[in-house]
């Protein structure tokens, strides 16, 4: 994880990110032409899922363009059945009975995923044997190359590879899509902030080309909006840890083996740490702001008042990738469209009950073309 989604390897995949972003824009331009609304969350999840699938197993996706949505369906099934398993079914004496049948459905979907990944791995191996390797390497190529090295100190198994992909599909798709969706929702509720962002993009990028990844370091207000979105709507509202030695925190005894939850949602709303915490205020993250939080390096996870990517050994390894996609997609959505919400002046941000902090209601809105780079 520490090699695959950072630095030069991440640069190798830039064409995938650009192509998939153009596909998203093309679909939204079409909706705009037809005067149709879009479920922005669904569009964004399709984007982040296609990007990750193409980085992971791009060669198979070229041959079977439906593969990303097939994988997504399996993952959605797993999430749905797992969410329906009640606490008593997982931990209580009734767990063996699986009264709802969701346990069986979950297991059967996981086996389906296993078979699909096994087939994909075999196809890669057959290509290797038949010497019909296509140009460029994706993450599967890199992992299979490691898998074939028998003398390595730490041997990668087929199960490791399948679980590795399962983890990045779970951890990388919805988190990135939700961050962009929440940002758009906040911009809809704060049109003055949207206008200020558009002015920044126009002055840095101009008005005849699309914002690109290399522009992001020159767009401090865009970066501040992303940080403020992650402060108010963290994708990981509860970080989970297991204590490995007896400890005392604030007078509380935490025993080795105890499981603890760190409530990031509460920490980023604590008025002792943040001024007017309930207000969406990207300016607080500009370097000259009096709160002085503009300097926080939120990817390193060393400032415990703001840990959108967690901290330490289990911190998010996909942060660089997630941030590149979030910044450029948000920039492009603001540059290309005016957004109108059906019958509403202000969006009500309701969250689902549970661990994820996701939006309870879909963000359905009309994209109205403001700038079309395909015509420029
Ligand atoms: C804006 C986007 C994202 C956000 C806000 C986010 C946030 C997080 C958070 C809060 C954690 C828990 C960290 C901890 O407990 O200390 C996490 C873990 C993780 N994330 Fe992300 N993430 C994002 C994108 C991604 C992407 C794109 C990938 C993969 C390409 C990814 C892969 C992972 C993995 C594998 C873990 C588990 C790490 C472990 O347990 O060792 N994330 N992420």
Image (cartoon, rainbow, N blue to C red):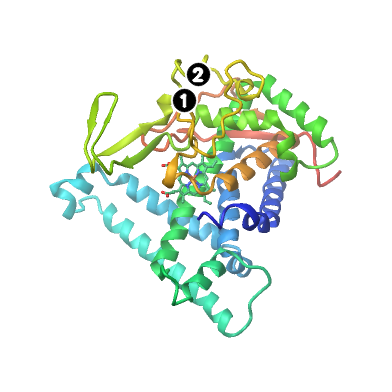
Residue 310 visible here: yes
Left or right of 3: which side holds 248?
left
Mark 1 near mark 2, Cβ–Cβ under 8 Å?
Answer: yes
> Is disc 2 placed on a helix, strand or loop?
loop
* Residue 369 image-quadrant placement: top right
Number of numbered discs on residues: 2
Read off the residue under disc 1: 268
Q: Residue at x 55, y 46 (%)?
A: 45
Q: Position of residue 316 (x, y in %)?
A: 48, 45
Residue 35 visible here: no
Dot 2: few (<14), some (14–19), or many (≥20) neighbours within 10 Å? some
Q: Residue at x 66, y 34 (%)?
A: 366
Q: Residue at x 57, y 27 (%)?
A: 228
Does the Cβ of the disc 1 residue fall within 8 Å of ligand 1?
A: no
> Is disc 1 placed on a helix, strand or loop?
loop
Residue farthest along the bottom direction in this orientation:
130
Read off the residue under disc 2: 274
Which one is in front, 267 or 16? 267
Which one is in front, 184 or 154? 154
Q: CA distance from mark 1 to mark 2?
A: 7 Å
Q: Position of residue 95 (x, y in %)?
A: 18, 51
Left or right of 105: which side holds 137?
right
- Residue 372 drawn above or below residue 252: below
Q: Residue at x 41, y 60 (%)?
A: 163
Left or right of 310: which side holds 321?
right
Q: If the image is split into quadrants, where does the C terminus sit? A: top right
- Residue 25 drawn above or below residue 13: above
Q: Position of residue 176 (x, y in %)?
A: 55, 43
């Amino acid at each position: 994880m520490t090699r695959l989604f950072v630095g030069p390897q991440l640069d190798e995949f830039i064409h995938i990110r650009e192509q998939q972003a153009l596909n998203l824009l093309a679909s939204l331009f079409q909706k705009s032409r037809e005067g149709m609304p879009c479920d922005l969350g669904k569009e964004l999840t399709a984007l982040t899922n296609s990007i990750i699938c193409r980085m992971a197993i791009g060669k198979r996706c070229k041959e079977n363009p439906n593969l990303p949505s097939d994988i997504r369906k399996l993952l959605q099934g797993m999430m749905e059945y797992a969410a329906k398993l009640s606490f008593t079914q997982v931990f209580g004496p009734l767990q063996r009975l699986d009264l709802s049948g969701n346990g069986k459905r979950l297991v059967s979907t996981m086996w389906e995923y296993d078979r699909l990944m096994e087939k994909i791995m075999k196809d890669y191996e057959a290509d290797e044997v038949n010497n019909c390797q296509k140009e460029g390497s994706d993450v599967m190529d890199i992992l299979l190359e490691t898998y074939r090295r028998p003398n390595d100190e730490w041997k990668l198994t087929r199960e490791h590879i399948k679980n590795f992909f399962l983890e990045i599909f779970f951890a990388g798709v919805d988190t990135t899509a939700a961050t962009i969706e929440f940002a758009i929702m906040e911009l809809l509720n704060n049109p003055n902030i949207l206008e200020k962002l558009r002015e920044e993009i126009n002055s840095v990028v101009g008005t005849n080309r699309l914002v690109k990844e290399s522009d992001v370091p020159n767009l401090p207000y865009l970066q501040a909006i992303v940080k403020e979105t992650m402060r108010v709507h963290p994708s990981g509202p509860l970080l989970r840890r297991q204590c490995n030695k007896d400890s005392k925190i604030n007078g509380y005894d935490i025993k080795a083996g105890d499981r603890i939850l760190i409530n990031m949602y509460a920490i980023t709303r604590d008025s002792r740490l943040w001024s007017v915490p309930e207000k969406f205020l990207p300016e607080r993250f500009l370097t000259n702001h009096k709160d002085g939080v503009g300097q926080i390096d939120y990817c390193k996870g060393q400032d415990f008042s703001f840990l959108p990517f967690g901290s330490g050994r289990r911190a998010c390894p996909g942060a660089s990738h997630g941030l590149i996609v979030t910044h450029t997609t948000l920039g492009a959505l603001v540059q290309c469209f005016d957004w109108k919400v059906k019958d509403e002046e202000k969006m009500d941000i309701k969250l689902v009950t549970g661990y994820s902090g996701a939006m309870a209601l879909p963000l359905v809105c009309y994209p109205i073309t403001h700038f079309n780079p395909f015509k420029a």
